[in-house]
Image (tube, rainbow, N blue to C red):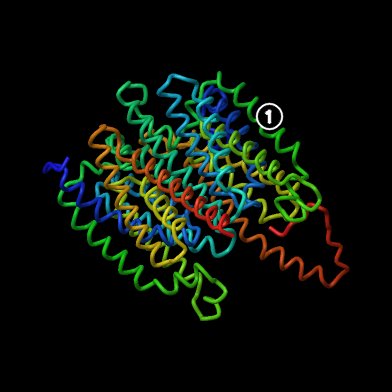
């Protein structure tokens, strides 16, 4: 038994301070991303969600250059980018793709400039890699309070507009007819998304930011059509994948003889990707169950928030 | 500015820009901006893999951009297209992170692969870039009608027997080819700006598809030439200027379209 235990948790896993920070921050980022991600997937704004990560990375590299706090840079420019995208046409489905692309292109150009200027000041050695990939094993525990406060703000925003947001996501026309301020709700959601993405970009890196935003939510929406349930499922998948990934990355130092681990982001993304692929099998299983159920009285549950995913 | 060490840069940029203008026109028309961003960015991971194995970077880029295109195509068949793109992208980047963690000599190259090194092109790179460019243009000519029809009136394309999924996958493969040739020159991230800004500006200037395609090529050429000149003069990275000029041309195009609709409204 003990052998199995040390095989699963290599020695020192629970004592390592880096692991503790990674588990805490990774868990927080996973929850916030999963909640905002469900709406991102439903609204078809995956591109925006990913692009905001790159936009906030431009802020991060700018902050590095000016000597500001990276969190301020990431979240600040992410929020500005979300505002600009909303302004030049993120609302209309046709213009959304293009508006996102233009903002993204400009932000990438800025990143190129900031990183280039930064190499002269010597502050950004290895920065391209950090900005692109990030690593949750390098976060200091001093960052945790800021991350938690901003996460709570983003979650509170989504919670405050939950009903109108849901309605305007499912049917903007009905929402507008019922007097929901669709534009304001959409903008508030974009800002919450920007905070959430900027936060996870600085905390866990750009790859994981997109992976945690889209993967768990997309898998959850394939498993259940109730939005409230999908949020819970997405949070579980996100947190589970993050912790499993951290564990695998820690253990990977002991695989083989090279004593060289693989990056934690690789494992987390691999777990999320596998979960998404596995969730694709669910509709087939559900269809089989439905066929069986057709024989008896169909007691389908219908709620106001039931949506065909 | 036209010194001998700059010659290669001018030649390669002049090959890359029309290809980006033509492929980008369809990217904008079809609303495929996300795949057009994801394929080059994911292909970057292939370059990291090639560095690890010690093979030619172009092969790594080609393999990964093709994998990305086919992955997005097949994942997008069942399930949401943008979700498929996002997940294919993060999976490729995660592999890239794993490759990079295994090699140490690669780090200085990252910046130039991401943001481009148009001023560091050597003459051996010109021929492969030109060949891939010609292939891309040829593929677009072959696909021209089904692409046009399925982009503008998808219902009619279905009725005419154009298989939307095949056309989409074929188009993504063309994007992948364009990526392979351009990443070493303008960088994984900025080829995207070149494929979005100029075509978007062209589309807001005219609604006639043929004219817009031509304008898109012209604006892409001007953008790249101006970016190289500015980069030479101010010694800032060429990628910054490509991004800035791309966004600027789009802004000018939108401004022009706005003025025109106002003028029409005033006449009525």
Percent of width and height locating residue B89: 47, 50
Q: Is residue B112 above or below residue A274?
A: above
Label 1, residues with CA under 10 Å away: few <14, some 14-19, many ≥20:
some
Q: Nearer the viewer, residue B226 or A267?
A: B226
Q: Residue furthest right?
A: A297
| Rendered residue at 19%/54% (across/down) | B126
Quadrant in the picture for residue B178: bottom left
Front in this rendered view, residue A153 or A284: A153
- List the residue tagged with mark 1: A152
Q: Chain of mark 1?
A: A
Residue A121, horizontal then vertical, whole percent: 32, 21
Relative to B7, A132 lies left or right = right
The C terminus of chain B lies in quadrant: bottom right
Q: Where's residue A237, x and y in %?
A: 64, 44
Residue name at image x 45 percent, y 24 percent? A63
Residue A68 visible in rendering: yes
Q: Residue at 62% across / 61% down in the picture?
A: A281
Secondary structure of residue under mark 1: helix
Q: Is residue B51 above or below residue B257?
A: above
- Residue A306 placement, left or right of A30: right
The x and y percentages for residue A142 are 55, 18
């Amino acid at each position: 038994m003990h052998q199995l235990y040390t095989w699963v948790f290599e020695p020192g896993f629970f004592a390592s301070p880096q692991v503790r920070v990674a588990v805490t921050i990774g868990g927080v980022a996973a929850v916030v991303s999963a909640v905002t991600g469900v709406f991102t997937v439903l609204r078809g704004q995956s591109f925006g969600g990913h692009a905001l990560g790159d936009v906030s990375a431009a802020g991060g590299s700018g902050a590095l250059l000016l000597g500001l706090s990276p969190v301020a840079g990431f979240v600040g420019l992410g929020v500005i980018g979300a505002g600009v995208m909303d302004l030049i046409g993120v609302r209309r489905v046709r213009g959304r793709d293009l508006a996102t692309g233009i903002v993204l292109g400009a932000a990438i150009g800025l990143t190129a400039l900031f990183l280039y200027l930064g190499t002269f000041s010597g502050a950004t050695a290895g920065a391209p890699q950090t900005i692109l990939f990030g690593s949750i094993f390098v976060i200091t525990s001093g960052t945790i309070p800021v991350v938690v406060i901003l996460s709570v703000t983003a979650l509170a925003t989504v919670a405050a507009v939950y009903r109108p947001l849901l309605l305007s996501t499912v049917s903007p026309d009905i929402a507008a007819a019922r007097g929901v301020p669709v534009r304001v709700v959409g903008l508030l959601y974009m800002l919450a998304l920007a905070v959430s993405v900027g936060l996870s970009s600085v905390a866990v890196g750009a790859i994981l930011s997109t992976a945690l935003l889209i993967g768990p939510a997309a898998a959850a929406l394939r498993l259940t059509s109730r939005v409230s349930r999908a949020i819970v499922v997405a949070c579980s998948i996100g947190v589970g994948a993050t912790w499993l990934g951290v564990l695998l990355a820690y253990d990977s130092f002991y695989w083989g003889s090279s004593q060289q681990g693989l990056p934690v982001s690789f494992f987390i993304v691999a777990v999320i990707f596998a979960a998404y692929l596995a969730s694709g099998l669910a509709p087939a299983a559900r269809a089989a169950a439905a066929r069986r159920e057709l024989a008896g009285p169909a007691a389908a549950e219908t709620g106001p928030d039931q949506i065909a995913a | 500015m036209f010194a001998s060490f700059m010659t290669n840069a001018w030649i390669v940029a002049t090959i890359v820009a029309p290809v980006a203008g033509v492929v980008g026109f369809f990217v904008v028309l079809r609303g495929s901006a996300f795949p057009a961003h994801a394929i080059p960015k994911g292909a970057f991971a292939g370059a990291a893999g090639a560095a690890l194995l010690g093979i030619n970077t172009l092969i790594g880029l080609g393999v990964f951009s093709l994998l990305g295109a086919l992955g997005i195509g097949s994942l997008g068949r069942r399930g949401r297209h943008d979700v498929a793109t996002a997940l294919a992208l993060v999976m490729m980047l995660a592999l890239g992170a794993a490759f990079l963690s295994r090699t140490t000599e690669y780090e200085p190259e990252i910046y130039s692969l991401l943001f481009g090194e148009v001023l560091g092109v050597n003459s051996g790179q010109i021929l492969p870039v030109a060949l891939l460019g010609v292939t891309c243009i040829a593929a677009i000519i072959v696909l021209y009608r089904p692409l046009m029809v399925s982009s503008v009136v998808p219902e009619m394309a279905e009725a005419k027997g154009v298989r939307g999924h095949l056309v989409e996958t074929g188009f993504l493969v063309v994007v992948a080819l364009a990526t392979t040739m351009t990443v070493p020159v303008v960088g994984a991230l900025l080829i995207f700006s070149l494929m979005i800004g100029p075509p978007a500006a062209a589309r807001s200037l005219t609604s006639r598809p043929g004219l817009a395609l031509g304008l898109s090529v012209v604006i892409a050429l001007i953008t790249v030439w101006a970016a190289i000149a500015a980069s030479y003069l101010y010694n800032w990275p060429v990628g910054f200027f490509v991004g800035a000029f791309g966004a600027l041309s789009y802004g000018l195009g939108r401004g022009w379209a706005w003025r025109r609709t106002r003028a029409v409204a005033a006449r009525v």
